[in-house]
Image: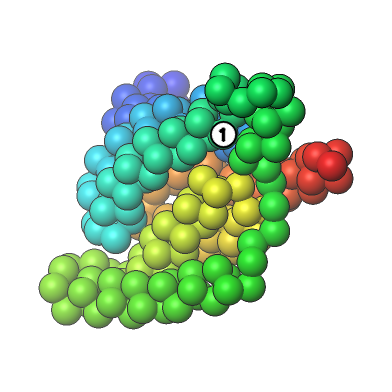
Amino acid sequence: MIATTFSWILDNLIEIFGVISGIIYVFLEIKQDVRLWPVGFVTAGVYMWVFFGGKLYADACLQFYYLVISVLGWRWWIRSNSPNKTAPDSSATNKKDQLRVTHIKKGTAVVLAIVFAVCFITVWIVLDRLTDSPVPMADAFVSTLSAIATWMLARKYIEHWYLWILIDFVAALLFYERGLYPTIVLYLVYGVMAFVGLKEWRKSMATAF
């Protein structure tokens, strides 16, 4: 039994590392800690490998998007939290210019909904017709909605937590289908932590003004 468990751990070492870094990522996200972005960069690199191995091609390509958005999010969060040294009242200006947690505007939400619909259908068709993916619709749904949610995180829209709650539980079912058991645990933890994150971000909105 011990030998079997040890062998399984060795065979899934990369995926287990991704699970650990992913949990750290969400913990930092809840705390609005800018270090979430470099951790997210590492996690994306790990899961690019894991998802290609599991024939989850859309999710694998999504990890490349995560690499890019991690750099952009890091830049946006650092820049918004950096003092404006040229302003007469540096501390006051810095507080005003910080990227705060806000509600998404209706116009932006509509645009994102359209982008999601177009990307979802496009990715679904590509996976269904051009790859050997066994779950093209679910893979396309999780990957495209995750891309939208991550962009919303980079802009600190609180509604991104609602998307993650949906994504995490749908993804857990998808990964069960593909036998990625450590990743199932990760996404179930993500789902629970998303509720915590939503609560904490609401508190930060209440105290921001």
Q: How is the image coloured?
A: rainbow
Residue 131 seen in this snapshot:
yes
In the image, residue 45 above or below residue 65: above
- Position of 65 with respect to 188 (left or right) is left
Position of 20 compared to 54: left or right? right
Q: Where's residue 54, x and y in %?
A: 27, 52
In the displayed orientation, state which residue is furthest to the front: 88
Please report the residue visible at 54 percent of the width from the left and 54 percent of the height from the top.
152
Mark 1, Cα crowd under 10 Å, few <14 / some 14-19 / many 20+, is some
Q: Could you say which quadrant of the image residue 5 lies in?
A: top left
Q: Residue at x 32, y 49 (%)?
A: 65
> In the figure, is residue 41 to the left or right of 37?
left
Seen at 55% across and 49% down, the residue is: 155
Helix, strand or loop for disc 1: helix
Q: Which residue is situated farthest in the left direction here?
A: 130
Q: Is residue 180 above or below residue 38?
A: below
Q: Which residue is mark 1?
A: 80
**Residue 208: x percent and y percent?**
81, 40
How many numbered discs, if any?
A: 1
Q: Please tell me which residue lies in front, 6 or 112.
A: 112
Give the quadrant of the C terminus.
Answer: top right
Decide if residue 203 is in sight here.
no
Vertical side of 54 occupied by 8: above or below: above
The residue located at (13%, 73%) in the rendering is: 130
**x, y percent for residue 120:** 37, 74
Towards the viewer: 183 or 61: 61
Kind of residue at disc 1? Ser
- In the rendered view of the protein, which quadrant contains the N terminus? top left
